[in-house]
Amino acid sequence: CSGSPPSTMKRPVRKKKKNRLLSSRAEPASFVDILEERRRGSDISHALRAFSPPPGCGAPPPSPSALNKMVLESQHLRYVVLEVRDTPGQEEAAALLDEMSQNLQVTFIRLLGFALSKIFTRLFRRIQVNEDGLARLQQATQEHPVILMPNHRSYVDFLVLSYIMFTYDLSIPVIAAGIPLMGMSLIGEIFRRSGAFFIRRAIGSDKLYWAVLSEYVRTIVRTGFAPVEFYVEGLRSRTLKSLTPKMGMMHMVLEPFLKGEVYDLSLVPVSISYDRVLEESLLAHELLGVPKPRETTRGLLKARRVLEQDYGSMHVYFGNPVSVRELAKGRIGRGQYNLVPRDLPGRPSEESQAFASAAAHRVVRLQERGTVLSPWSLTALLVLQRPDGTRWDLLARDTLWLRGIALQLGARLDWPADLPDLEVMSSSMALHRSVVRCEEGCVWLVEEAGPEPVTQEEGVFRRASAVLMCASYRNQALHVFTRPAMVAVAMGTVPGHSQEDIYRHFCFLRDLFANEFVFVPGCGPQDFEEGCSGLQQCGAVSATDHELKPTEEERDTIVFLSAILEPFIETYQVVFRILCDERLQVFTEKSFVPAVRADAMKLLISGNPVTLRRDTEGYLPPTPTCCKLQCPNIYFRQSHCRIHPGSCSPTPLCGPQVATSSPI
Amino acid sequence: SSHFFRQDIMKWNGWGYSDSRFLFNKKGQGEFTGKRYRLSGMILPSLKDWFEATFGTSLQHKTPATPTLNVSAVPPPNLVEPFVEELKVAGVAASHDPEGRVFRSHGHCLHEIFALREGRIGRVPDLVVWPNCHNDVVKIVELACKYNVCLMPYGGGTSVSSALECPLEETRSVVSLDTSQMNRILWIDEKNLTVHVEAGIIGQDLERQLNESGYCTGHEPDSMEFSSLGGWVATRASGMKKNIYGNIEDLVVHIKMVTPRGVIEKSCQGPRMSTGPDIHHFIMGSEGTLGVVTEVTMKIRPLPEYQKYGSIVFPNFQQGVSCLREVARQRCAPASIRLMDNEQFQFGHALKPQVSSIFTSFLDGLKKFYITKFKGFEPHHLCVATLLFEGDREKVLQHEKQVYDIAAKFGGLAAGEDNGQRGYMLTFVIAYLRDLGMDYYVIGESFETSVPWDRVLDLCRNVKERIVRECKERGVQFPPFSTCRVTQTYDAGACVYFYFAFNYRGLADPLHVYERVEHEAREEILANGGSLSHHHGVGKLRKEWMREAVSTVGLGMLQSVKEYVDPNNIFGNRNLL
């Protein structure tokens, strides 16, 4: 990357022909393929380029050891060490910090830049990045501490933001990573030197660990020398559907603002999406109960063969920075720390918790809105509704129809305008020939090959695996349809057309699916409004003062949208049924999921027509733990699930809230 | 007559003495007129550049004030004739002359002065009375109760809390009770080191007269040229040298106040008592809502043998605050220690008079070179603390060394006596500068707070930033001047003073913008753990936050005192509650 900086962005922003079809509602974004230049230029010179990110809002970056010293000497840590006096706290804290802390070094960023250039150019045709978002990000880094909040869909996305930031001369973020990554020999150390810091899973009530971690994060935020990057969803989504956010890190990054230690924070939602996810079959297997392989360097080397396949494009969309101060306006009293030392350890107030939760949900929603969808996502949605095969020309026609609806609903589609639509769809589908095949004008799902003959169980398993892979791509697009679909379902279950009744049913669905889809807490009316106006956009309903009526012309749309939610509703029905039939009234959380899985398998094999009307489609309910949070008469205590006979009043939920939503 | 003495030599629509003002002369050079101050008659060569660069103004665009008061714009007085008659019989001076009434209808809030400059006159008192002594006040209050007249005590008129504004909803006759004639020192008690003074005395007069006897109170608020003892008591004033002499609450031994219920005072002058809640604390900070303070006994000290100014340059504000915090921790604060931020430091430089010799300018250049190049201080980050030491010569020198040693630990460099002295001199002339700004589309104000030590930095940064952002959001075209200084240190915290000014060209309603920004700045202060006020008081300007500040029960307590002492709201200025 030679040449002098022409504008605020050091990397020349090339004016590229705008070839993206963009919906009327999603704001336009100009994507640039950062791999194009890598293919033309030398990776070495890219890695060795002059790297001088503009100074951030804070002080110059402290050395990792100086940072650790600040943390260890903090008043907060001193309070906690006093509190847990039974252990030699100070030393233990230092040890924890050693395990945790990043050791960001520009040399390693360069090394990484080199390696990733090699890997990415092999894996992907393009890495599309919206430069307008990067320009906004650069602006934001100069004003306030920045929190980068990407979604997490693949192992590949772990360092991609750092790679982009390096390419665009922006400060390299420090990244919260799970401790398993650290365990990988060599790789762990490379990650650490690339700015990763490592967090243990299941910290539970280890006060000292919490204190060290939160002080570490807060110190980084407070000093503002580098953006902090973390996955607000907590983990990689196995279903490619957004997960409800985890609050631990969220509280830590928000606290410096709530305590007035920084003027403002910018939360930057980043939406990463793939035409094809590297781990697609692994994910499906994991959902079906095959344990995930442990992260090891050896495993990584073995996985080299994935490099030989074509994964299409990766899209990274940097959303508008969200000012936490703006979010907090009128929602939270910042004077709440006026009467206690701000360093005093303590749980966040209820008000802060509600605020953090709303903020986190909002960011996930913004990630969803920013997600760039491939045409295949839409096709997958239709394929799933015709799993026994369909004619290609019909599928293509319907995909085009669905594209119209998706655009009306504000989807961000990667649909090149300069190619014939048919070619766009077929090439997008061709990328997924491991899942779906098109022969002689017909399209059908492909099951994994394996030793013959297969047992009935194996048959279901193979079928399910194909369906789940397909479903995960559908899931990437689900957020576009969720709210209108819920209104559509609610309309179908209400006798008249009264908006009020429809809203009540909508709210029931919203509560039911609170862990299935992401809803900002307390925004029921807005969600309803969004659903209704989406339907109106599509011309599917007409709204009067108090009524919501389907229009004659677009009845198909309503039917189609309702059908999107059907598998989810059925999954819940199946799980509830199993729960009610269960002889055993107490079971462990660990055994719950496999038990449900086994039961569902039985149902599928027996072809029970009542519970699984659409069993031919192979909808399996693999991880129905979500139900426990919905069902008022179930609660978990110490990982035991107990069904309360006859109790219908909502029981407070105890125990860990580890709901993993179902993939379908 | 002497009643009008002060208003004759003072501006009717600006700060301070009529003969003292900043202006840009024909050459465009800054100049301070008059003979009263060290800066008077001097040319300030850098003022124009600083002014234009800071506010984005041009000397071409002027907004001159209405030169004289348009008497016909003053509403006719609403007089209660029998009240006026009885006052006359009692021998109390009174007048409804419009100029006198307008003069006492305001303090020095921006909106008050801005309106006067535009010739807008709002509600003004209907009558001004000048009691001569405590007994006159007793008579006036009795008559006011008898005729249900609203009384508003008026001391020095330097309020910056809208405390002197006549409440618009007041329908009764409003009488301004001017204490300026009650200005005698009644006795000095050298055995107990106390002085008994009438409460109308002005700060500088009190200090000068005491100095003649070899004493001082040491109470020196920035407004001491014009503010009165009674006003200090009524607002809980704070003086620059409180580290040695204490704030007003530490200085007061005895207070006499006339209320509608009668006179309140303690029976003796014991230095401390345990007789229930201290009734002085109902009086101090009552802001004229309960009665008129007529006489005060205060502590005095022998004049210090030696005074020495000083200054320290710090590489940045954070280091400066850390140093002040350490000084407070070691309880070795000099009589005064103040820390200006970088913007104020540069502002101070803009007010440097023309240097008389090449040698001085050479020396200045050398100093600058040493600090910025040799010591590596970033000119846009460095900041300055000004110091004032007082006491025995030897102790002062010792003390000075102790403070400079602490400063060195925080990267502070001693920067000379001259800088320090100029810093303190500026506090007196800085108030005049606002009038200059208002001649050129610039409006501004200062406000203050007190805050625990650990929040000082965060509060300063956040409030300054909030001001900048709010201005931008409200359409202010040029970034505002938003700056602060730490002016007092305490064991558990500090007092922070903010200056805020902006160029209002292009704004339809600059006052409204100004008021909103000030409001938001106060919200920011409160959100960052700052107090509603350190010494300016609440008045009517900050009333809306009183409940939040003292709790509902606290407010109820104050209200019940008001109800008992003044059930008919004779002291109806409606401050505080």
Image (spheres, coloured by chain):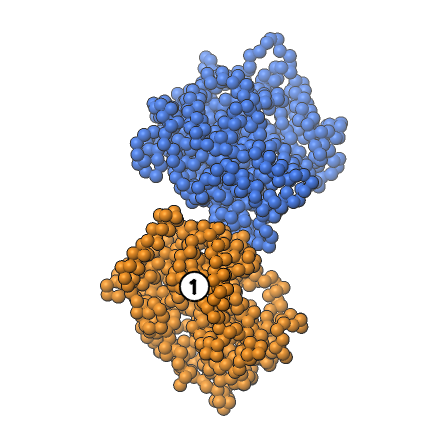
Chain colours: A blue, B orange
Pick the quarter of the image with the N terminus of chain B: bottom left
Residue that extends furthest to the front in the rendered view of this protein: B394
Q: Which residue appears at 30% of the width and 69% of the height? A: B41
Instruction: Identify the residue at image location x=33%, y=59%.
Output: B350
Determine the residue positioned at 48% across, 87% down. B92
How far across and how far down the image is residue A101, in percent? 54, 34
B462 relative to A570, above or below: below
In the rendered image, residue B300, in percent from the top left (x then y), is placed at: 53, 74
Q: Is residue B379 above or below residue A411?
A: below
Can the viewer see residue A365 in this picture? no
Mark 1 sits on what residue? B309
Residue A201 percent across, percent down from the top left: 61, 32
Tag 1: residue type? Tyr
Q: Toward the viewer: A313 or A645?
A: A313
Residue drawn at point x = 59 percent, y = 16 percent? A462
- Few, some or many residues within 10 Å of mark 1 (<14, 14–19, 20+): many
Quarter residue A281 falls in? top right
Quarter of the rendering occupied by the C terminus of chain B: bottom right
- The image shows a total of numbered marks equal to 1
Q: Can you give x and y, in whole percent of width and height, for residue B88 in the image? A: 48, 89
Check disc 1 and report its element: helix, strand or loop.
strand
Q: Residue A110 sits in which quadrant?
A: top left
Residue B407 appears in the figure: yes
Give A488 or B197, whichever is nearer the viewer: B197
Q: Chain of mark 1?
A: B
- Whether A521 is drawn above or below B358: the answer is above
| Residue at far bottom of view | B89
Q: Is residue A98 above or below residue B142?
A: above
